[in-house]
Image: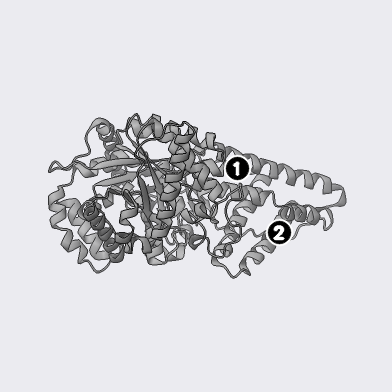
Amino acid sequence: MRRAFTGHGASRGSALGHARVRLPFLFEVSEQHIAEADIATELARLHAAIQDVRAELHAARERLHGALAHEVGEFLDLHALLLDDPELLQGLDALIRDSRYSADYALRLQRDRLAAVFAAMDDDYFRSRSEDVDQVIGRLHAALHRGEPHAGGVAGEILVTDTVAPAELVQLQSQGVLAIVTTGGSMLSHAAILARSLHIPLVVGAGEVLQHVNDGDVLVVDGARGRVVVSPDATDLREYRTRRRDEQRERRQLHRLRREPTRTLDGVDIRLYANAESRADVAEAHALGAAGLGLYRTEYLFLRGAVAPDEDTQFRAYRDAVLGMTGRTVTIRTLDLGADKADRGGLTLPHEPNPALGCRGVRLSLARADIFAVQMRALLRASGYGPLRILVPMVATREEMLEVAALLHRTRKALRAEGHHVADEVPLGAMIEVPAAALALPALADTVDFVSIGTNDLVQYLLAADRNNDALEALQSPLHPAVLRVLREVIRTCRACGLPVAVCGEMAGDPLFVPLLLALGLEEFSLHPTTLLEVRQAIRACDLGALRRRAGALMRARDRAAIEHWMQRAASTP
């Protein structure tokens, strides 16, 4: 029987296929004992499963590149650390050897014990890590039962589940999953951001879908509208085919925009920069005609090794990014690590009570002056190969920028004394993602040469809503009057001070937000290359003058519904 469900479209695209239902991880395994003669066999079975999961995690880590690789990698690294936890492994062995439990029941007992430990913690962040325990135990349980009925891949299927972890998405894509539908999740979560980068259609918050969808049911998924249809009828199938034709036509049209200018209908040029963190990203940005790199992340260099990268390693990475853009400006963000990221080099504080508000970004860099000095030397050496700007994350005070500027001056002087060629001008910028920096920008303005607005963190800090907390999904949106007012004031202040300003968060990469950002006065976007052509197309369909004239109505909007209504009108009347 046909049924339709509505959630939130988190990643655009359409899919038609059979459902693969994955129920919430309850891990209901009854008590199972084994004979003494079977202990060695059961231990070998468990250890083989552990090795299989280690290999899976390693393979997924090796495949990572480009969009959010460092953020996805943090989940994989955390799972690998859990998998190597001696307490977990020794406990499993003891339950099998001493209590003669089956491997499945030993996993169940260890999972329940660890979950109870996390649940007893006072800190919300660490309590949430119990989900990672479930993910690791779930992987081990699946590895124990490989080859049993229905344990195969998801090629050509649509995964229907309660939630999906970022660490899973790379593997699901490689397995050929068509789309994903979840009952929980947020449009601003790491998983949703990665799904958009990987072009996997994703619908989140689809309510009762798990209660009404069975394995093998035929589904139609519309990732743009957040719609899921079970047992589609003839009308649904016609609409699906029409959407697919439209999507294919749009892709062909987008391909033709690779060499077209990013210019509004009324002839105003808008600058599109690319976010990057790998050679592949740089090459794609160059091929798509990006004006430069607006955000080159450096964390991946620090996350992939057990020790911090040395000066020459960093220098080569930064130099290659500069050379790869052939004279276009490259903006490199200094280290943006915190305790919420898996840091194998031991740079971050291991047990911060609230990592999102802790020693991260520029705070960590200034606290680890030795590490920061090496990165600054590598950056300035790379500036001799082309236009390079340095972007400082998590800025909150004027004093932080003055300290960074002083280090920049000392480092430039030292490098020149050593005979290195350093550019005469290396602009220094601040990321505006802490509300204090946004409000105090006039006091910061004389310490910076440009500004980049990180909307992902700015939104969650302004609204006090963790973007990875499903329970706060309704709050996790930039379509809040307070967010728009802050964006407008930052853009206005920058314009008054003669400072270039870009938005580099996910908001900049969503074509739906293009009219809104243009109306607020933005003229520079920085986004992942995968959405660059879509944003270029959206800009070319806008009349900038008309949007600016409607900006007053936008700023008078009192709630999300009014802002969405403004966006709908802007989209329908260029």
- Where is 487 relative to 391, above or below? below
Residue 339 horizontal side relative to residue 109, left or right: left
Quadrant for the N terminus, please: bottom left
Counting residues from the N terminus, which is met first, the one under dot 1 or under dot 2? 1
In percent of the image, x 57 and y 47: which residue is there?
A: 76
Q: Position of residue 14 (x, y in %)?
A: 36, 44
Q: How many marks do you count on the picture?
A: 2
Amino acid type of the residue tagged 2 in the rendering = Gln
At label 1, counting other C-alpha atoms closer than 10 Å, the crowd grade (few under 14, some 14-19, many 20 or more) is many
Residue 532 horizontal side relative to residue 192, left or right: left
Secondary element type, mark 1:
helix
Front residue (pair 475, 262): 262
Q: Position of residue 94 (x, y in %)?
A: 80, 55
Q: Position of residue 270 (x, y in %)?
A: 22, 43
Whether residue 228 is visible here, answered yes or no, is no
- Read off the residue under disc 2: 110
In percent of the image, x 38 and y 57: which residue is there?
A: 433
Q: Quarter of the image holding residue 348?
A: bottom right
Query: How far separated are the C-alphas under marks 1 and 2?
Result: 21 Å
Residue 258 horizontal side relative to residue 26, left or right: left
- Read off the residue under disc 1: 57
- Where is 38 relative to 320, above or below? below
On residue 205, which mark appears? none
Of circles 1 and 2, which is in front? 1
In percent of the image, x 54 and y 46: which residue is there?
A: 371
Front residue (pair 112, 242): 112
